[in-house]
Amino acid sequence: MIIEDERDLDPPIDVPVEVSSPNIEFVENKPTRFQNFLSRFGEIKNAEAHFSLWNALIDHLWEEYLNTK
């Protein structure tokens, strides 16, 4: 079986288009912003809250399982 070469010998040439520069937000109060990030990160990584929610989820799933029987 013969396969013909079907590629385009004269492909169109892409002309680069100028793109405007993006808008950049300058933050002047970096330490406060970083402290806010650390406090939110600490709340997310709070082990006590994690295990409390985990136990509540397990209790809920057991109640759902026992109610379906």
Image: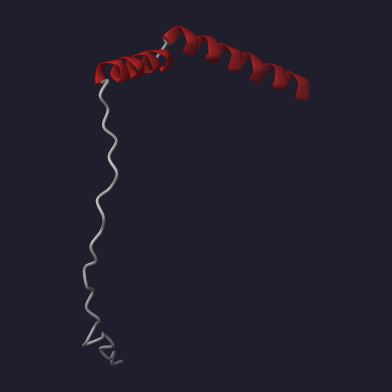
Q: How many marks?
A: 0
* x, y percent for residue 33: 31, 20
* x, y percent for residue 16: 21, 68
Tell me if residue 52 comes above or below residue 19 in the rendering.
above
> Which quarter of the picture shows residue 47?
top left
Q: How is the image coloured?
A: secondary structure
* Residue at (29% x, 89% y) in the render: 3
Q: Note whether residue 48 is visible.
A: yes
Q: Quadrant of the C terminus?
A: top right
* Residue at (27% x, 40% y) in the render: 24
* x, y percent for residue 4: 27, 91
Q: Note whether residue 69 is visible.
A: no
* Residue at (60% x, 16% y) in the render: 58
In the image shown, does 62 or 31 lie closer to the viewer? 31
Left or right: where 4 falls relative to 60: left
Q: Residue furthest top?
A: 48
Q: Quadrant of the N terminus?
A: bottom left
Tell me if residue 31 comes above or below residue 17 in the rendering.
above
> Which quarter of the picture shows residue 66?
top right
In the image shown, does 37 or 49 lie closer to the viewer? 37
In the image shown, does 58 or 8 lie closer to the viewer? 8
